Amino acid sequence: MGEMDIAVGKGESAGADSVLLWILVWSELVAFGALLVAFLVMTVVDVDGAALLRSHLHPGLAAVNTLLLVFSGWQAALAVRRGDGSVRRPLVIAALCGLAFVAVKTVEYVIEIRTGIGGAGRLAELYFLITGFHLLHVAFGAGILLLVAWRPSRGNVLMIATLWHAIDLIWLVMFPIVYLT
């Protein structure tokens, strides 16, 4: 049995892997969707808190992070498209962009905390919950991208690229809701 056979699996296990992957992706989308709906509701309920929160946010840094994730997603897509021995470089670039996202978001958090974002109360808590949960996904996903780049197989490249695109999609929905509304 070759490396590709082991990674993708045979018969039913390949189908089971795919089903589990899509269950994970959809559960992530539902979880973040619920959090973002809660955030939108809270901005309507607490208009003053929303204004205070937004006065502490940095849409420019969030836009840089958006570009990092879009470029990273493109690199992950390139890895899937290549499907041969040349997948390592785009996977590593995708991971490095993810780690750069983590660095920029960490700097943003430090600035926000120093300038008193906590005064926004529950909305600040919800902001940190949503963006922090996403940040953990990005950090974890970047680590998995590096692991897959180290020992790539078609099935693993497809799985991490799918998860990485879900993480990107969540940010692309989160960005305008949190930073631009």
Image (cartoon, rainbow, N blue to C red):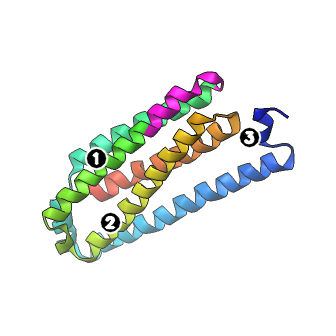
**Quick check: 105 above or below 33?**
above
Helix, strand or loop status at disc 1: helix
Query: Which image quadrant is residue 48 in?
Result: bottom left
Q: Residue furthest front?
A: 150
Q: Amino acid under label 2?
A: Phe
Which residue occupies the foreground of this view, 37 or 151?
151
Look at mark 3 in the image and give the residue it sits on: 7
Which residue occupies the foreground of this view, 86 or 83?
86
Q: Residue at x 58, y 35 (%)?
A: 150
In which quadrant is the C terminus drawn?
A: bottom left
The x and y percentages for residue 140 are 49, 52
- Asked whether residue 169 is in view, the answer is no
Q: Residue at x 24, y 51 (%)?
A: 107
Look at mark 2 in the image and give the residue it sits on: 128
The x and y percentages for residue 9 are 80, 43
Q: Amino acid under label 3?
A: Ala
Helix, strand or loop status at disc 3: helix
Separation of residues labelled 2 and 1 (CA atoms): 15 Å
Specify whether 139 is left or right of 26. Answer: left
Q: Which mark is residue 104?
A: 1
What residue range appears in magenta? 83-95
Numbered circles on residues, count: 3
Main secondary structure type of the part rendered in magenta = helix
The x and y percentages for residue 80 are 61, 31
* Residue 29 included in the magenta stretch of the image: no
In which quadrant is the N terminus drawn?
A: top right
Q: Residue at x 26, y 70 (%)?
A: 124
